[in-house]
Image (cartoon, grey):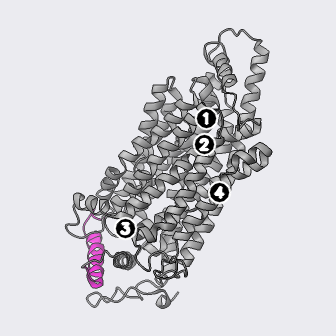
Amino acid sequence: MNLTHLGPVPRDEDDPELDTDSVKDATGLFRRISWRVLPLFFCMVVFCYIDRTNLAFAAIQLTEDLEFTPEVFGLGSGLFFLGYAGLQIPSNLILKHTRANVWLACIAAAWAFTCAGFAAMRKKWHFYALRLLLGATEAGAFPGMWYYFTKFYPGDRLTMPYAVVESGISLSHVVAAPLAAGLLSLNGARGMRGWQWLFLLEACPSLLTAIFMLLFLPASVETAKFLTEREKRWLTARIAQGQQQQQVAAGMSSSASLPMLLKSASASSSTSSNVHGSGGGLSSSHGPGPSTWELVAAAASNPYAWYLGAVKFVRDIAGFGIIFWTPTIVQAILKGNAISLDLDAAHHHHAVGVHGQGPYHGGNSTSSPVAGEARVASHDETGVHAVLLTAIPFALAAGFSFIVAHHSQREGEKLLHISVPYVVAGIVYSFFPWAVAHSALLGFTCLTVGVMGVYSGSAANLALLQELSAGPSFVVAAPLYNSLGNIGGFVGPYMVGALVQQFRSFALPSVIMAGCLIVAGLMVFAMPMLLKLPGGVSGWTPGSGLGYGAFSKRAAMP
């Protein structure tokens, strides 16, 4: 493929090899990169989220066995994000200076062992401690992946790789639902409850992922054996050029000229090929780069990172409130009591099953053993059906997020691709209390649209963040954005649990989560006016009404 119409990296007079003839097929180059790194990251995301959110499926049995009230369950679900938010920036700073495959493999192995530990918990403080630890061990996974992509893809090609990673989140629930149903059905095998098998066995794929990451993930462009030396130099220069152009567009002009960037790329690649062991870290700077303090200061002074983090905070209140409670909500829909939960009856039921009198702990029951077993069997059967039905909204969410990401990258526009789905999904989900009161199908439809809306703008949101935080500071801006957002992941599940326990209904929490989606969409829509978004960024056209009068096609670059 000729690269002329794609916007070549200009020739550097000091290095004639770095021109359009260096790489004959840029699309083929990025395709090879994608086939090498995206499957590994996709698996990492799927298993990460399975281990993070399998609690939602285990809750159908676990909350009764351990006498966890909705408030305890909601608090434990949310505590994950306190450990998660605090360690993301330190983890990415470590990643910047170490081998990416080693550090990401360590992260995957650590959360796998933590997940397996849930099978042994007995008390609520075990639950709280393990959720905090799981958050801490998973903290570096997503910011690390996002930063890794910026070293292999230029900014105008990041939306689809981000979409692949983000689709792994929603598809993890599709996989997790039937998997959880099967593992929960092992209830009683070898004296263990189904939820214990769930935590124990679902940790195994994460350990395998850690091994594959260690063995097959390139540590950096310089160590990627599937790229030629000429391709490495061209790719490094191409990414540097894109970052410089994004910095200029966002008002963060760099003093480095393109020839200097090209020369640095060439020197970096040459050094890595001649010095054993170099090129292992993701930092692409040659010589002394920005200090840790300078990186943190640059990210902390970036208003776009804070604003998009605030958007993610509001969205994640809805997102994780929905994610952790969807199986329970679906089960309530199946039982016809999503609007008026009988928590007293539920508490009496698990009291019979937990305090030494039920099938889990043994002992004598004051009621008929046959009747008690029938109630438990009926409850477990409904729970399995709920888990399987949960796969539907998440499968549709994965497909819809790909459509939005593809259209966003093709049009070179992100703001409307983020804001419109949030607002529309929030409006539809706000009708959940009315819909479920009239029909289980209508209620399930509203819930499905809500789940689709939560995931719709994730890839475009990340690409927008990278566009407005291009350069070395993205290594800190990405985890800063994610940390701010995931505080909402603590608020959402806890809020739902507390309100369900207080009002014995999912009606009010659903309306609040819908409102959060709408607010997140409006915040993105208003971003250009509130922060004076530079012209040319993500399709923003100043002086044309609200500025959304025209989409700018993606930059003509390979």
Q: Earlier in the sequence, mark 1 or mark 4?
A: 4
Amino acid carrying mark 4 in the image: Ile
Q: Label 3 vs label 2: CA separation?
A: 34 Å
Asked if disc 2 and disc 1 are in contact, CB closer than 8 Å, the reply is yes
Amino acid carrying mark 3 in the image: Ser
Query: Which corner quadrant of the image does residue 11 belong to?
Result: bottom left
Asked if disc 3 and disc 2 are in contact, CB closer than 8 Å, the reply is no
| Outermost front residue | 545
The local secondary structure at tag 1 comes to helix
The local secondary structure at tag 3 comes to loop
Residue linked to disc 3: 469
- In the rendered structure, which segment of residues is drawn in magenta? 256-280
Asked whether 484 falls inside the magenta stretch, the response is no
Query: Considering depth in this image, is 307 or 289 the residue closer to the camera?
Result: 307
Residue linked to disc 1: 500
Residue linked to disc 4: 427
Q: Position of residue 33 (x, y in %)?
A: 48, 69
For image coordinates 76% across by 35% down, the residue present is 335
Q: Earlier in the sequence, mark 3 or mark 2?
A: 3
Which class describes the residues within 10 Å of circle 2: few (<14), some (14-19), or many (20+)?
A: many
Which class describes the residues within 10 Å of circle 3: few (<14), some (14-19), or many (20+)?
A: many
Asked if disc 1 and disc 4 are in contact, CB closer than 8 Å, the reply is no
Q: Earlier in the sequence, mark 4 or mark 3?
A: 4
Q: Label 2 vs label 4: CA separation?
A: 14 Å
Residue linked to disc 2: 509
Asked whether 263 falls inside the magenta stretch, the response is yes
Q: Position of residue 86 (x, y in %)?
A: 36, 45
Which class describes the residues within 10 Å of circle 4: few (<14), some (14-19), or many (20+)?
A: some
Amino acid carrying mark 2 in the image: Pro
The local secondary structure at tag 4 comes to helix
